[in-house]
Structure formats: structure tokens, C-alpha cells
Image (cartoon, helix red, strand yellow):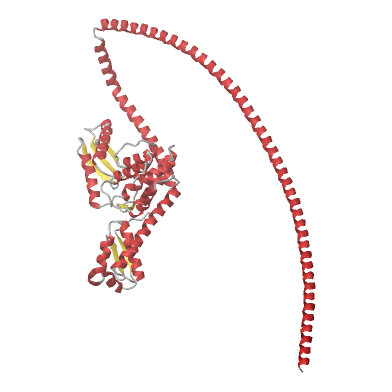
Amino acid sequence: MLNEILLGGSIAMVSGLFGFFISKKITHANFDVFVDQAKAKASAIENEAQNLLHKSKLKSQEIELEASRHYESAKDRAKADLHQREDDVIRKEQNFKRYKQNEDKRLRDDSRVIEAKKVDLDRNEKSIKSIKKKYEEKVDEALHTIEHSAGMTQDEAKKVLLDKVEEKSRGDIAHIVRRYENEAKTEGQKKANYILAQAASRFAGNFASERLTNLVHLEDDELKGRIIGKEGRNIKALETLMGVDIIIDDTPNAILVSSFNLYRRAIATKTLQLLIADGRIQPARIEEIYEKVSQEFEDGILNEGEELIADMDIGAMHPELVKLIGKLRYRASYGQNALAHTLEVAHLAGVMASEMGGDSRLAKRAGLLHDIGKALTYEHEGSHVDLGADICNRYSEHSVVINAIYAHHGHEEMNSIECASVCVADALSAARPGARREVLESFLKRVTQIEEIASVHLGVKQAYAINAGREVRVIVNATLVNDDESILMSKEIAKEIEEQVQYPGEIKVNVIRESRAVVYAK
């Protein structure tokens, strides 16, 4: 039994050893196969890499040859261009030398001619002085002879002669003066009418008078109570913050916003509309909406000013002036919107300056800025003329612009065509019918003052201000005032009106003298 077990174990051991050796042999054979396959793949990869390297070398050589050809071509073109430029420079130098030689020769010839003419002038001047001296001597001899023969000195004879000539010529002189004055007026009127007609026909604008209140529509009258708030808290916050009067009365579905300041009134109206649409009406919300609307208006006036300047084509302008131009939309004078007035003046001034041979762009720029001070009058003290001139000087505007600001209210004389165009355009815009509203009391006062100025003159029988104060007719006594004196009187009255009365546009002074001879045949 033991022997059988030992024999079985020996057989198993021998079988295991034999299997191990056989397995090892097989594995070694497989390893050799794998090694051979790896070597074959490595050899193939190496061959492929060699091929790629060879192709890359060929490609680089082709690129290098192509670059070399381009370089040589560019080099040849550059050399040709350089030679061409050198030839041009040499040719221009030669031409300049010839031109310089010709000019030098011409200058030498001109210099010789000038010297010869100078010698002739000196000679002629000496000859003229000699002749003049002889002439004066002859005149003195003739005067001495006349004095002896007439029994009067030279001064006495001169005085008598001048008195006689003045007496005989007085009527002729007055007639000539009147004739030329009438001709000048006729021609000036024709030219002025032509220029104004051209300017007016090439510009047209729509205008609406500004009111003092804005109407805010309400969906329901119950909103009035919410706007007033508990114990008037909301309406007090609104009026205090926005600087306007809010009028809440029995008008159905509406409230009024009242203020002389158009800008504040517009902001207040927009703020109320947003609050009504939002529905939350309380002091904190009021302040929030007001600040938002104020910022929107500030941005809006700047954008509007930039658009206007771009449309007018007048060049660049400082941003502060641009903002003030936009702000003119919320200013008014006698009910006329300041921005509308400014744009009308700018367009009319540009057309008139162009017709008269001036700078159209500069005239439009001066017209656009002539009332810029009105955008500052609510926040600063002083007249809009001084405020406008100060801010334009601060931002280095053209001297013509400054002159137009002062001259359109008579603070300075007009120094240019552009300035005169602005002044005329300002008078046209302000004086045309319907442009402005005026207080009845001030209108009557002005008309009465014009009639009083005309009535105080000697020989005036009656004086009437007609045509809404644009004309005054003065009827004089024909026995006390002659034709020449009537012309002088009209000028004196016009000058006094200019000095004493404030008025837009111009006033025509018409002096009427009439003499009648009435005889009845019986």
C-alpha cells in the first residue's frame, strides 16, 4: 500500500516536471514569435519615418527654393523702384535748378527795371516840386493883384465868395442829398428784401407758445387722494422736492403742474406720470422716481444738443455748451420757446450770411449760441447776455460769437457780416406776428412812450403809433416845418426812440407834411 502511494506520487511528480518543461518551452517559443513581430513592426515604423523625413526634406527644399525666388523677385522690383525714384529725384533737382536760375534772372531784370523807374520817379518828383513852387508863386502874385484891385484882403474875399456860393448852393445841396438818400434807401430796401426773402423762403419752422401749466391725466379721481397723502404728506414732498405747484381741484380725472421754470415743470410732470403708473406714491418712492427722471432728462438734453449740432454742421463744441443748448428747450421768452427761437435765428443767419458773402457755418454757430445765457438765468444772477458771453469766453468760442451775444441787444457794435446776420435774424424771429406774447400793460406803455417822444418836437400837430407799435406817424404844421426840416425831425425822433425805448425789431418813423391852398370861386 505504501509502495503504491510512493509510486503514484513519483509518477505525479515526474508528470508535473515534464509538464513544466513542456510549458516553458512553448512559452519561450511564443516569446520569440512576439519579439520577431515587434522587430518587424519597429522596422516598418522606422522605414515609414525615413520616408516621411525624406519627404519633409524635399518639401523644405521646395519651400526654400520658392522663398528664394520670391526674395529675388522682390529684390529686383525694389531695385527697379529705387532706380526709378533716383531718376525722378535727379530730374526734379535739374528742373528746380533751371527754375531757380530763371527766377534769379527774372528777379535781377525786375530789380534793374525797378531801379530805373525809381530814378525816373525821383527826377519827376523834383520836377513836380519845382513846377508846384512856380505855380504857388504865380497864384500869390494873382491874389495880390486882385486884393489891390478889389480893395479887400484875401480872407475877406474868400469869406464873401464862400457865403455867396453857400447861399446859392444850399437848395441844390439839399435836393442832391435828398435824391441820393432816396436812391440809397430804394437800393438798400431792394437788397434787404431780396436777402430776407431768400432767407425766409429757405427756412420754415413750426412754433407753439409755451404755457405755465401742464395737465396730468388720472384714470380715477381716487388717485387725487393718494397724491395728496395722509395729512398732505405726499403732495408736500412732491412740491418741496420738485419746486413746482401741484393744483388739485374739481377738474375730473386731471391735476395741474404749475411753474415758470419749464425744465422743472417737465421733470415734475414725468415724475407724476411714472408714480401714477407705478401706484406706489410715498415720499421715499417719490424721491427715487424723481432722481431717476432727473438723470434721464440730463442725458436727454445732452443727446438732443449733440444731435442739433450734428444736424447744423457747425463743428465741435464743448460738452457743457452742448448740454446748455439742449436745455434751451425748457426755457421760454414771452411765450416763445428759446430753443425754437435759437434754431430759427441760426438758420436765418446762416442763409443771410451766405447771401452777403460771409461765413455761413460761423453765422449759424453764433446764432445757435447768441441766447445760450438763457439756459443759466434760473440758476445764476445776471442778464443772459453777460452769462452767455462769460461761458462762451470760458470755453474759447470765436470772437464773432461773443460779439453776436453782446450786439444782438445793443451792448456792442456789430463787427462782421456774421454778427449782423445774427442780429437781423434775432429781430425777425422775435418780431414776427405770433412769435411772442406780451403783457398788455407793457405794450401800452411802450406805445404811449413812442407817441410822447414824437409829440414834444416843435411843429408837431399829432403823433400816432400804429401797426402794433411798429410805426409812428407824425403830422407836422406845414407853415412851421419845411421839407428839409421834416427829414431832420424824423432822424431825431428815430434816434430818441432808439435811446429811450426797449422794443423788438424796428420802428418806422413817418413824418408827414402837407400844405393846402383852398380858394372858392364865387
* Rendered-image quadrant of the N terminus: bottom right
Q: Which residue is found at the position 36% from the left and 7% from the top?
A: 133
Q: Is residue 244 left or right of residue 183?
A: left
Quadrant in the picture for residue 369: top left
Q: Which residue is found at the position 59% from the left and 25% from the top?
A: 96
Query: Is residue 154 among what the camera can see?
Result: yes
Front in this rendered view, residue 296 or 273:
296
Residue 16, x across and y down, in percent: 77, 82
Front in this rendered view, residue 430 or 314:
314
Query: Is residue 505 among what the camera can see?
Result: no
Q: Is residue 94 left or right of residue 114?
A: right
351 up-or-down from 262: above or below: above
Front in this rendered view, residue 167 or 197:
197
244 up-or-down from 511: above or below: below
Count of numbered tags = 0
Farthest residue toward the bottom?
1
* Rendered-image quadrant of the C terminus: top left
249 up-or-down from 124: above or below: below
Residue 219, x across and y down, in percent: 34, 72
Front in this rendered view, residue 178 or 30:
30
Residue 12, x across and y down, in percent: 77, 86
Q: Which residue is found at the position 53% from the left and 18% from the top?
A: 107
Residue 75, x across and y down, in percent: 69, 38
